[in-house]
Amino acid sequence: MATAALTMDDLLADEAVQVKQVTRGEVIDGKVLSVRKHEILIDLGPQGIGLVPRREVGFSKLNVGDEVTASIVDAELDNGQVLLSLRKAAKDKGWDEVIAKMESGEIIEVTPYDANRGGLLVEYDGVRGFLPVSQLSAEHYPRVGSNDKDEILQRLNALTNISLQVRILDADRKANKLIFSEKEAVKEGLAARFEKLAVGDTVKGVATGVVDYGIFVNVEGIEGLVHISEISWERVNNPSDYVKVGQSIEAKIIAIDKDRLSLSMKQLSEDPWLSEVEKFSTGETVEGTVTRITPFGAFVQISSAVEALVHVSELGEGDSADPEKVFTLNERKSFVILDIERDNRKISLGLPGSKKAK
């Protein structure tokens, strides 16, 4: 039986059946045909030529011949080309990956591409997210004095283009919200390190921040704080006079809190007060320099390591009992030692001629 000859209309109709019509939102594969300044052309095979505006390329660097996956934005432009977006396709695929990573709790690696005063801007698998300052590890948290916003931003900018280990803290595809946490990524490792530490241990670390009330220290990923009162046996007015950011220090653990170490630098050396106080005795007259004047009395330096107090009750009554009117800052005067309490590191002074001093 003879087969009927196919007409041109039959061939065209058959071709139309084989070539599937593309629709908006569909994901399609293709090959890079050309890379231009403002656009990239994609060979879609039977579906024709696709056009990707530069803003829809994303961060990928493409070359002619590269195979890509794109999302269709417009099935047919005026010139017959298909408008595509590589960024959207990557984002749609990326969200699936993001949700999977969050649900598994897996630690992932990201590289921040920018920063603002609130944290770091991050892109993972085509999905843009945020790593808040509050979710940075102790190693990277920008501890700065007086919450200097410019210095905070400077410290955060130093973290861009650096690989960080993070976990996904929150992900909401509909709200386009993606939050990362470095703290969560290091939590398990920190727990193991905490177990190896004990009060009394001497540790080494690096100063990550110097503030008015002390020094923050990174001890192998664990945050520690040397309070201003634990920096030196002498009176400390400004912690930055003793330590700079980035400086290596050694300290003693004096307390272990939930997620932080309380450290002491001064307790690594003997208290000079204990040896110098042996030079003094009750009833002795000494020379001293007034270092502080308060409503309850005046502090007096009677040796390099010993500071004593003249209590307001030792000054008499009326105007004579006002420390501001009796003493002048930095003046040197004679005092009488009334009492020495070695256990409390306390020496009480009186003025020569006072009732208790007689």
Image (cartoon, rainbow, N blue to C red):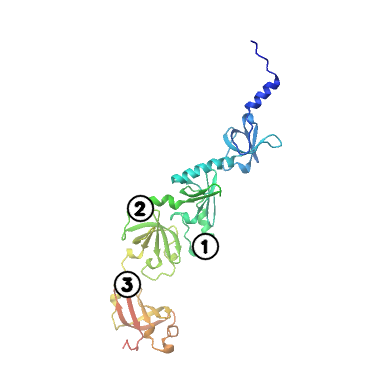
Type of the residue with mark 1: Asp
Q: Which residue is mark 2?
A: 193
Nearer the observer, disc 1 or disc 3?
1
Type of the residue with mark 3: Trp
Helix, strand or loop at disc 1?
Answer: loop
Q: What crowding class fits label 3: few (fewer than 14 Cα within 10 Å), some (14-19), or many (20 or more)?
A: some
Q: Quadrant of residue 84?
A: top right
Q: Nearer the viewer, residue 355 or 72?
A: 72
User: How far, Cα to Cα, is label 1 from label 3?
Assistant: 37 Å
Helix, strand or loop at disc 2?
Answer: helix
Nearer the observer, disc 1 or disc 2?
2
Q: Which mark is residue 322?
A: none
Q: Quadrant of residue 326?
A: bottom left
* Residue that extends furthest to the top in the rendered view of this protein: 1
Q: Does the CB distance between marks 3 and 2 fall below 8 Å?
A: no
Q: Which mark is residue 273?
A: 3
Helix, strand or loop at disc 3?
Answer: helix
- Visible in this render: residue 179? yes
Q: Residue at x 35, y 65 (%)?
A: 266
User: How far, Cα to Cα, is label 3 from label 2?
Assistant: 35 Å
Q: Quadrant of the C terminus?
A: bottom left
Q: Quadrant of residue 289?
A: bottom left
In percent of width and height, residue 156 lies at 51, 55
Above/below status of 15 relative to 23: above
Q: Which residue is mark 1?
A: 148
